[in-house]
Image (cartoon, grey):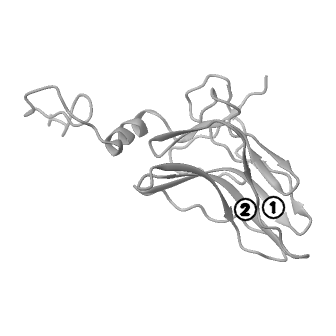
Amino acid sequence: MPDLDTFGFFYKTATDTDDTYDYNSQEYAEFVKLLISDGVAAHYGNQFRATLSGSNIIVQSGAVVLNGYHGLNKGDVPLTPQLLPSGDRRADYVVLKVSTNARKLSLELFEGAVTTGTPVLPEIPEPTDLLAYLPIWSYTVAAAGISVLTDCRIFNLSGSNFKAGTAVPSAVTLRPGEVYFQVAST
């Protein structure tokens, strides 16, 4: 049977003579991706719950693992979608975005196309080595304001209070190997 390319912790090879190795953030992120799926941590803060306040979406505290990187939001973050002229509608996402080259995690709005008919949610770009996105809420915006928020959060499996078998909301698109869980109400 052939040997694997590496063994042990990260990039230890059979020719290494000592047990030291300096790991960069990309190597560590690759290791984390092997252990933890992308998603919101069920055990920290308010799991990025969101509320409407006038024309603002207030995203609460939470922790996330995204593309092997983790981030914390310790307080409320207000986001203000642009309202539309009368008769127009748009479907948007609130997303968590990790940018490895800028070394930051942020909350952003992804705006869909403006229409007078039924709005369609925008496509979320596939993750790359530099950028990854995780939609956590969707909503419809019009001249009258923002519709009810729809929960799109995908939770990683590091907590224990999950309700399995929950139907996946239509706004959530799972990539191969991802599983949707909803935190059970207490």
Determine which residue is flagged by label 1: 140
Residue 4 drawn above or below residue 80: above
Residue 40, image x, y percentages: 61, 38
Percent coordinates x, y for residue 152 in the rendering: 70, 47
Quadrant of the rendering where the C terminus is positioned: top right
Amino acid on which disc 1 is placed? Thr
Question: Label 2, on which residue?
Answer: 92
With 173 as the anchor, is 6 left or right in this view? left
Q: Nearer the viewer, residue 66 or 107?
A: 107
Instruction: Name the residue: 47% across, 34% down.
Output: 36
Q: Which mark is residue 156?
A: none
Marked residue nearer the N-terminal end (2 or 1): 2
At 69% from the left and 38% from the top, the residue drawn is: 75
Mark 1 surroundings: few (<14), some (14-19) or many (≥20) residues within 10 A: many
User: Which kind of residue does numbered mark 2 sit on?
Assistant: Asp
Which residue occupies the foreground of this view, 51 or 155? 51
Give me the C-alpha separation between circle 2 and circle 1: 6 Å
Tell me what residue is drawn at x 67 percent, y 23 percent.
Answer: 161
Please rate how many residues cluster around mark 2, counting C-alpha atoms within 10 Å: few if below 14, some from 14 to 19, many from 20. Answer: many
**Front in this rendered view, residue 83 or 91:** 83
Q: Nearer the viewer, residue 1 or 63?
A: 63
* In contact (CB < 8 Å): disc 2 and disc 1: yes
Q: Is residue 16 left or right of residue 115?
A: left
Residue 47, position as x, y percentages in the image: 68, 35
Q: Position of residue 114 (x, y in %)?
A: 76, 75
- Tell me where residue 72 sits by quadrant: top right
The answer to whether 16 appears left or right of 60 in the picture is left
Q: Secondary structure at mark 1?
A: strand
